[in-house]
Each structure stands twice: as structure tokens, then as C-alpha cells.
């Protein structure tokens, strides 16, 4: 079977870590009898600086012909903060309606955690983050003048009514800023149901819902209502609610309690970085932006680290694990299992790890070690 995969290496260390991820996926394809047709796209800071556009419409169309997207990293100090992130990352997420952000929070053997007296048996859960709503829809403004009027129009395919119009008039002399969040029943229902289905698939017995309904009552009371309704379809799975401030505390104190966590967009953005730290750092944290019925995108959650570009010191494990998630999503389940086992073997041995894990290995050396582990595991089974 052949899979057509879009590759966006991106900025900084992105091309370096993507190279190692591709290397691992390619050897698995060879061993397990499928093929990967990598289609590379140049969208990056360099592309933007040359063409004055981040992601052209014809590029979106070509990416849409692929089964999934493999992304390296985005960000460059030569480009104003937010341009690349909004016009590449968010544009891809919204265009392909990647309404699930899936973040495994797994501490692997051999990896240190900053949490005292915690080990791999304590940190092994999933965060399912809603990925297209909440305060990330881009509605907002800043007022500088009295009686200034701003009109918003929101067009969203995920909304029951895809167009909203809102007028706001500034009546104060001082400057003000407004950011609006949107939570819809449809958007909430599909991500919450995905979380329960993931719990079934991974044999997890508890789903925790995150919100701030005690203060942000309008948005998150709807989220709670939908969670309660969906939970009725899964009577064998335990459920609970947690405020976002509380869950950050309990992630640190008792991470072993959590199995599947489902959260609105903004809170998920915050708590998944905490999750990355307790699992050993950004270099070990993969993420998936998933549309179960469409084109999904997989990436390490770390940034582009431009000051390390070309030095081959970046940890590629997060990108390799993002490749493992990609393989699972496109149906190459056995290959995905072997890739995770190979990563575990490399980390457990601790002989070929990068500086962030106390080693001195180069980026490509970690990739090579993972490839060798893949071959060893394959031939031993």
C-alpha cells in the first residue's frame, strides 16, 4: 500500500529533525511492505521573505491531495511573531478542520522527570484538546478612539450557523482590547466523543473534563452540558470535572490519576506544555492535529530553536514519535508499535541521546540508533 504524505520541514531545526523522522518511517515501510511518497513543501520563513506569502492557496490544494502532513517546526526571528504561526499552523488547522489536538504525555524509561519520586508508571496519559474554537478563532480588536465602531463577521464551518455578525462601539477614552471566544455544541461534542472513543481504544477507564465554568460561565457551562450528555453513551468509563487551575496542580502532585483528559482549546494549549515538562521535556513531546475524516498533521510540539540551526544538537525524538502517531493514523499499526518500541529501547539504553537528556549524541546519530533498534526488534519478532 502507498501513502502520500506532505512534508513541511519549516524553520530552524525543523528540517534536521524531520530528516530523522522520515528516516525511521522509511525503514519501517521497507520492512512492513508499504511505501511512503513524501511530497515536500517549502513553506517557511525563507519562503515568506521571498514571496511575501506564507501559504498560498494552490499550496493548500496540493497538500489537500495528501493523506497526512508531517511538520518540522515554525518560527524565525526575521519574521514578526505571529505571522508564520497564524498563516501556516492555524491556517492548516482551520482549512483542514483538524479539530483534535492529541498529546500523549508519556514518561519513557531512562528519561528523567522533574517530579520527585515519579517514574514511567506514574506518567502515562493523553490530553485531547479541542483545536478550532475557543479564544483561538481570531475575533478581537483594540480601541484607541472614543466612539470607534468595529464590526466582526465570523465564518465557521463547525458552527450550526456558519456566519455571525457582532458590532462593538468604544465609548471610553482609554485604550481597550477585546478577545472573543466561541464554544459550539457541535465543536464540543465531536472532540469530547473522540476522547471517550480514545479511552475505549487505549483501554483507559477515566475521562477528565477541563474548564473554568465557575468564572467563564457562558462558554464552559455549554462545554460541561455536552460532556455530561456524551458521557451517558459510555457508562463503563468514569468521568469527572476539573477546573484548569486545579488540574495544573494535580498534574504535578498526582499525574498517575489521569488517563484521558479532554479540554477546550486555550486550556489545552497551556496544560500540554506542563505535560511535556513532566514527561522529560519538549524534545520528547509529539502532537497530532487530527481530522479523523480528513487530512491530519503531526509535529513535535517544540519550536524551531533558530540559534541551534545546523548544529545537529536538537533532540529528534519528539519528531520521531510524531511519525509514530502519523503511522497509527494512516493505519500502519504494527509499524507504529515497532517505532515506539525502538524509541523506548534507545532511551532506556541511554547511550545515544542528545544534550537535553544528558548525552552528547548528534541529531542524526539518534535517528541512526532508532533505525538500528527498529531493525533489531523486527528481526527478533
Image (cartoon, rainbow, N blue to C red):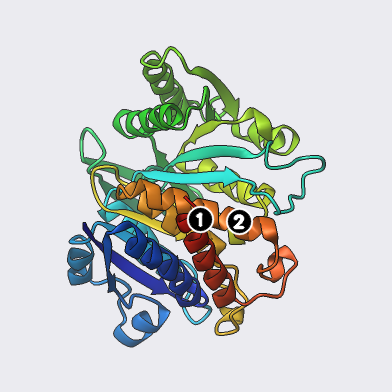
> What residue did someone put label 2 on?
345
> What residue did someone put label 1 on?
377
Observer-nearest of 64 and 89: 64
Q: Is residue 372 left or right of residue 332?
A: right
Q: Position of residue 277 (x, y in %)?
A: 67, 52
Label 1 packing within 10 angstroms: few (<14), some (14-19), many (20+): some
Q: Is residue 79 above or below residue 7?
A: below
Q: Quadrant of residue 267?
A: top right
Q: Quadrant of residue 248?
A: top right
Q: Is residue 79 left or right of residue 150?
A: right
* Residue at screen point 32% across, 28% down: 185
Identify the disc placed on residue 219. none
- For label 2, the SS is helix
Q: Position of residue 75 (x, y in %)?
A: 49, 72
Q: Is residue 180 above or below residue 64?
A: above
Q: Is residue 215 above or below residue 13?
A: above
* Residue at screen point 30% across, 52% down: 94
Q: Position of residue 332 (x, y in %)?
A: 33, 50
Q: Earlier in the sequence, mark 2 or mark 1?
A: 2
Residue 95 visible in the displayed image: yes
* Residue at screen point 45% across, 76% down: 15
Label 2 packing within 10 angstroms: few (<14), some (14-19), many (20+): some
Q: Position of residue 227 (x, y in %)?
A: 42, 22
Query: Do labels 2 and 1 touch, CB within 8 Å?
Result: yes
Q: Is residue 56 left or right of residue 250?
A: left
The quarter of the rendered structure image containing the N terminus is bottom left
Residue 144 visible in the displayed image: no
Observer-nearest of 63 and 140: 63
Amino acid at each position: 500500500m502507498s501513502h502520500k504524505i506532505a512534508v513541511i520541514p519549516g524553520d530552524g531545526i525543523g528540517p534536521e529533525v524531520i530528516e530523522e523522522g522520515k528516516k525511521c518511517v522509511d525503514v519501517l515501510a521497507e520492512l512492513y511492505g508499504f511505501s511512503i511518497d513524501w511530497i515536500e513543501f517549502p513553506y517557511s520563513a525563507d519562503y515568506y521573505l521571498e514571496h511575501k506569502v506564507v501559504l498560498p492557496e494552490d499550496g493548500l490544494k496540493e497538500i489537500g491531495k495528501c493523506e497526512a502532513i508531517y511538520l518540522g517546526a515554525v518560527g524565525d526571528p526575521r519574521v514578526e511573531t505571529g505571522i508564520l504561526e497564524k498563516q501556516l499552523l492555524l491556517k492548516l488547522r482551520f482549512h483542514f478542520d483538524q479539530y483534535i489536538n492529541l498529546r500523549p504525555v508519556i514518561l519513557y524509561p531512562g528519561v528523567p522527570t522533574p517530579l520527585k519520586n515519579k517514574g514511567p508508571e506514574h506518567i502515562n496519559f493523553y490530553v485531547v484538546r479541542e483545536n478550532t474554537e475557543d479564544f483561538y478563532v481570531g475575533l478581537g480588536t483594540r480601541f484607541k478612539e472614543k466612539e470607534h465602531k468595529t464590526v466582526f463577521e465570523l465564518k465557521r464551518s463547525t458552527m450550526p450557523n456558519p456566519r455571525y455578525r457582532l458590532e462593538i462601539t468604544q465609548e471610553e477614552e482609554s485604550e481597550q482590547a477585546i478577545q472573543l471566544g466561541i464554544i459550539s455544541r457541535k465543536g464540543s461534542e465531536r472532540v469530547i466523543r473522540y476522547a471517550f472513543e480514545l479511552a475505549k481504544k487505549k483501554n483507559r477507564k477515566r475521562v477528565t473534563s477541563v474548564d473554568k465554568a465557575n468564572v467563564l460561565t457562558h462558554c464552559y457551562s455549554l462545554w460541561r452540558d455536552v460532556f455530561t450528555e456524551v458521557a451517558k453513551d459510555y457508562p463503563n468509563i468514569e468521568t469527572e470535572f476539573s477546573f484548569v487551575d486545579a488540574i495544573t496542580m494535580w498534574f504535578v502532585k498526582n499525574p498517575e490519576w489521569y488517563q484521558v483528559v479532554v479540554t477546550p482549546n486555550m486550556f489545552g494549549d497551556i496544560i500540554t506544555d506542563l505535560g511535556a515538562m513532566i514527561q522529560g521535556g519538549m524534545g520528547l513531546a509529539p502532537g497530532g492535529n487530527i481530522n479523523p475524516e480528513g487530512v491530519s498533521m503531526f509535529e513535535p510540539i517544540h519550536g524551531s530553536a533558530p540559534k541551534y540551526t545546523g548544529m545537529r544538537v536538537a533532540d529528534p525524538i519528539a519528531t520521531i514519535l510524531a511519525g509514530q502517531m502519523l503511522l497509527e493514523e494512516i493505519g500502519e499499526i504494527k509499524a507504529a508499535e515497532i517505532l515506539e518500541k525502538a524509541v523506548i529501547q534507545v532511551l532506556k539504553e541511554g547511550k545515544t541521546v542528545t544534550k537535553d537528556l544528558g548525552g552528547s549524541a548528534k541529531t542524526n546519530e539518534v535517528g541512526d540508533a532508532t533505525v538500528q533498534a527498529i531493525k533489531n526488534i523486527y528481526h527478533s519478532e
